[in-house]
Image: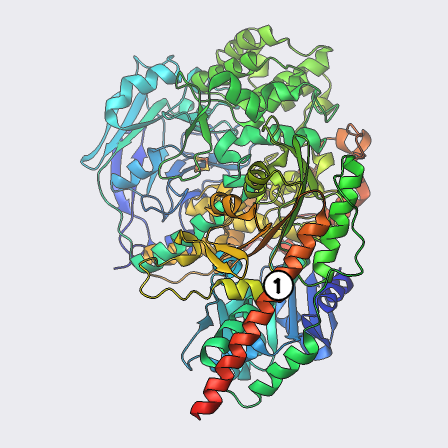
Amino acid sequence: MSGMSLRQYMLVVDLSSGRMRREEIPPELLRAYLGGRGLGVRLLRGRHTLSPFDPAMPVVFAVGPLCGTPAPTSARLSVVSRSPLTGTVYDCSAGGRFAWRLRAAGLFAILIEGKSPRPVALAVSSAGEELLPADALWGKGVGETVRALSDRGSVATIGPAGENGVLFSNILMGEGNAVGRGGLGAVLGRKNLKAVTVDGDLRIPVADRERFDRARADVLRLFRASPVIFGELGISEYGTPALVDLMRQRRMAPTENFRRTVFEDSSAYSGPAIRAAYGAKKEGCYGCPIRCKKRASDERPLPEYETVSHFGALNAISDLHSIVRSNDACNDLGMDTISAAATLSAWGEARGRFPAAEEIGPLLHDIAHRRGEGDLLAEGSRRVAEALGKPELSMSVKSLELPAYDPRGAYGMALAYATSNRGGCHLRAYPISHEILRKPVASDRFSFSGKARMIKIAEDTNAAVDSLVACKFAFFGASLEEYAELLSGVTGEPRTPQGLKEIGERIWLTERFYNARNGFTRADDDLPTRFFTEAGSSGEGIDVPPIDRARFGEELTKYYRIRGLRDDGSFPDDGFLERQP
Amino acid sequence: MIAKTAEKLYRDCSVVQGRVGIAAQDDVMLSEGAPDLSRLAADVLSRLSCLGVVAASPSLPFASYLLRRSNADAKAIVPLDTETRTFLHDIPIVRREELSRDPAGAIAAHLSKRKGVIAEGVGIVASGPVTLEQAYIHYSSVFHAAFVKYLLDALQAGFVLPGEAEAFRSFRDTFLQPLTAEGLPFRPGPLDAPEEVLAEIRAVGRYTVLRGLVDSFFGNISYRVGDTIFISQTAASLDELAGCIDPVPTDNRSTTGITASSELLAHRRIYEATGARAILHGHPKFAVAMSMLCDVKDCPVKDCWKDCTRVRMLGDTPIVAGEIGAGGLAVRVPPVIGGPGKAIVYGHGVFAIGRDGFEEAFRSMVDVENRCREEYFRRLDARTERQSKSE
Ligand code: SF4
């Protein structure tokens, strides 16, 4: 039996008419795009130039071919649409339990289009699907919404931020995981879709059990051999805040809106500090052996590295409890922590004073409800900085706020921020893996040499990973070599890492092509000027100079060449999409 | 970078002089070395999404013998040492027929799935998806794996190919050099000043590579001062440790050591159990091979390398099982290493401790490997004798 050639179904929901239908996904699309991010990006074709808020713009929820099997870290969900914050094609993956319940309801994907006349929630199960009135839930926080819908399985919902069109609003999973960053919560909000619930009980077959089990054992062995994953100081123990001390030591922790790269008090919110203060317990996405998520003894999800660092160093705040409260507030309001903190920081620098710890909470509520200054802040740092006449203070790429890895401390990261199709994101090429964490091998973080090709290969690899849909953290130990085997085991169709990278390349180029059609050019593949003109915080034997702009440009040109693009980053012809399946 | 990679291969004595081809690509492809091999490396690389490829004739014919000794329908050899089991899984073999039409295509097809291959008549070809250095690492991993597996196969099945016995003799008489710690200056311990500790770790790391106790990549080394363990980083070349040593507090008040060697936990437990100051961990090949020979008949344990609970002895050195990193190695080594000052992990390598400094640890490791060599050749000679008597 071949799982991949088994029929896979997608639920198409037209919110305008309330009509819903299950239709088969053409198997050739699954072969060419795997699932998750790739499938979602493919399904946007033809509508990729619509405005993100156009009712006809689809939002795709898609799982990957490994979802529902015991493949480690693979029960993740991708959500794909066009971002109102960045204007780019946008995807984000989230863990939790939603993805495998979706698949267990007999669905590989949901495509949502149109706009409901009234607030609704979409409820899906193996028995069928219905649209429930959600007027009573409109205006409610994520926690309350999840509780109200919990008897319908896993919940993905927006909070007030999404309803009010905050450009960095998230979709939150009931388990506390977020479809983060690009404002897809606002896209659902505009569609008047408050939540999606899924429940199912179907089992997912594995075509070649022996092959699958062998690959799974290989993956687990690699996890055990990886200090970043299962090391006693790794993410399984401390969660991603394990990176706080490391980034401090490497002098690349963005501080005070990236004016500095060391925050003296960062140990206040390091992994060990969080563990001591909150008795952090391990928690994970469905079926994940790593369990990098941490919960406090009172069950609330504890913040990730980027969140603690940005509500901490970036705003010069060392009060751990305030940081955790900011995380709680963002989770309940349905708002992205990185963009929220970075927007506050840019605003703080522009007005000459970073917000104090006690001001943050009220400001977050104002943003989510677009009250007072919150109305402007809800637009994200680029629009805020422009409105205040200081556009250079938005530390973003393609309007997406940079996360907590200062590019002056890792040149691959600098290039990766610039070339990322969804804007200033660390998770596309994720060179932190080799530049900082030395996995699978170390590369020189203060050198551009070879980085153009490294970034290209990693972008392709991760596009495949996001389409499988596996967790990036698995790749601190395992590689596509083992995941290709898992896939071969599940589907019975042999796959190679090289083949997966080629799929990743197709997905990446498709995204870039969409962006190009929406007006993105080389000029958008750039970093804020600060990084080229101001040094980071040198010291302790580590020099953090400004990035050499000429060298950066040279490497960017190389990158385009390696991608088969023109030196200005454009496509050599218009026929790219037609040549793709 | 290409020149540096070639130099490392020569220094490791893992390639035949002049028989290395290396290709690396940025926006352009560069290749250097023996014309046929560098052309092949470039051709292979042009078909892969990778940074670099190394193609070379290994300095020992073991990989080629393994290929020729395998069944005609075998697609890969499966070495069972821990490094290979964990990182390579198996090593594809590409036979002459497959190579006849489009050698680069045939090799690339295998490299699209695995990190390195053994190609008949060519040697070992390995790829580096992230850096060229990674291709070098994969080359040396395959070389190491083939070396260890061949030692075991030769002991178990004898010499079966024409010329094999002669080649092995030459390996034994001329390739293998006496292994000694003589001539290496060590700082007498205990050391307290961090600068001194770092300098000594760097020096001893170099020694381990110089004397062939590790491939220049694997292995790890640490020294304890008060409540800090200075330990080599994960994926660090032991002969290039400058800037690659993490100071890790023993009470976990900081997670900076997230980049420390995957054996951090084992080192920490060994320090706790023994009070030692220095730990050296390498993968000397005879010790790795000998640790995988077990005489117990009808043992119910299947995955001996991780599940065996016995402590076997090789001379005065205990052998225990255990996986690297978060596996059981950190549990099983500390209780046995204190007395003898050294221990072997099944299929993996040697841990040696120094109560004050590295000299004791280094000498122990040299001693273990020499004894394993002796024992290996004793068993091999006995086997050869039996074989010739029965013929
Ligand atoms: S590593 Fe963490 S984020 Fe990734 S799948 Fe596991 S629990 Fe989820």
Tell me the quarter of the image containing the N terminus of chain B.
bottom right
Identify the residue at the far bottom of this view: B391
Coloring basis for residues: rainbow
How many labels sit on residues? 1
- Vertically, is B6 above or below A37? below
Residue lying at the far left in this picture: please name it.
A127
Q: Is residue A383 visible?
A: no
Residue A159: quadrant of the picture: top left
Residue B348: x percent and y percent?
53, 57
Which corner quadrant of the image does residue A1 belong to?
bottom left
Residue A225 pos. (x, y %): 51, 48
Ligand 1 quadrant? top left
Residue type at the position of mark 1: Glu
Provide the residue designation for mark 1.
B369
Relative to A382, A482 lies left or right = left
Can you give x and y, in whole percent of width and height, for residue B9 in the image? 71, 66
Q: Is residue A301 left or right of residue A112?
A: right
Residue A467 visible in the picture: yes
Residue in view at x 52 percent, y 19 percent: A276
Residue in view at x 62 percent, y 40 percent: B259
